[in-house]
Image (cartoon, coloured by chain):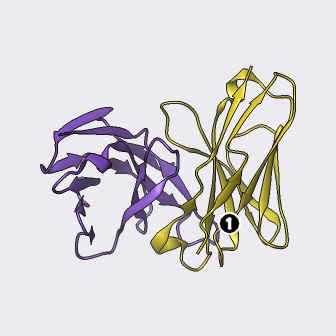
Amino acid sequence: DAGVTQSPTHLIKTRGQQVTLRCSPKSGHDTVSWYQQALGQGPQFIFQYYEEEERQRGNFPDRFSGHQFPNYSSELNVNALLLGDSALYLCASSLAQTFLLYGYTFGSGTRLTVV
Amino acid sequence: AQKITQTQPGMFVQEKEAVTLDCTYDTSDPSYGLFWYKQPSSGEMIFLIYQGSYDQQNATEGRYSLNFQKARKSANLVISASQLGDSAMYFCAMREGGNTGFQKLVFGTGTRLLVSP
């Protein structure tokens, strides 16, 4: 049973560029959430997708956008990259009915470095 | 807003000994859930244990147990018989969203555990 798959694993971008990160949720999961984890910090909620719509958004600017596809996979897009966007981006999937008990299944993340 | 506090940036323990990682929380919701995750250097967050606010007993999962003290708003993780593979970052998190359709986790800043031979 495949878990959450994220690609790419590592990425180096230049300030001002745009980046797209991809996530395939665990089989059977219908909800995808994205988190940003800066070095030495806990993950911070970016947004969550359910039924192809953004359900909720954290305190992140509009430069951060996303999409969920009919197969539940998801993309995170970041425009006009800043140095401060350098972080580990974690994708987490869940099933709406069981989140209360089991929380998320996380991927290994995409480490983004902005230079 | 809900908040998770982990006051131990780092902990050291010898192999085979027990260790307690502290977590306190703040919420006004009567219904909530607390999670512990392990994050090795690979980056993946691994679910360890869950405690619901209405659970009568402390949660246990193998070598992991959760010392849940509701009145003190603490949910400490106890790892018994530490192993070298337990060396990692450990995060305490709280489920936020109440009984709404939307749920997310709020994380603490983590504790780095180092297990020595």
Query: Residue at coordinates 82% horizontally, 67% vertically from top-left?
Result: A52
Q: Position of residue A54 (x, y in %)?
A: 79, 60
Residue farthest left in this picture: B17
User: Type of residue at label 1?
Assistant: Pro
Q: Which chain is yellow?
A: A
B53 vs A60, left or right, is: left
Q: Position of residue A97 (x, y in %)?
A: 58, 80
What residue is disc 1 on? A25
Q: Is residue B46 depicted above or below A36 in this figure?
A: below
Q: Is residue A38 depicted above or below A47 in this figure?
A: above
Q: Which chain is purple?
A: B
Q: Nearer the viewer, residue B76 or B32?
A: B76
Q: Nearer the viewer, residue B76 or A6?
A: A6
Query: Residue at coordinates 46% horizontally, 73% vertically from top-left?
Result: A101
Residue A32: name its quadrant: bottom right
Q: Is residue A71 depicted above or below B29 in this figure?
A: below
Quadrant of the rendering where the C terminus of chain B is positioned = top left
- Secondary structure beneath disc 1? loop
Q: What chain does badge 1 belong to?
A: A
B93 vs B114, left or right, is: right
Using the rendered image of the protein, determine whether residue A7 is visible from the camera's viewpoint. Answer: yes
A24 vs B18, left or right, is: right
Residue farthest front in this picture: B117
Residue B30: name its quadrant: bottom left
A72 vs B27, left or right, is: right
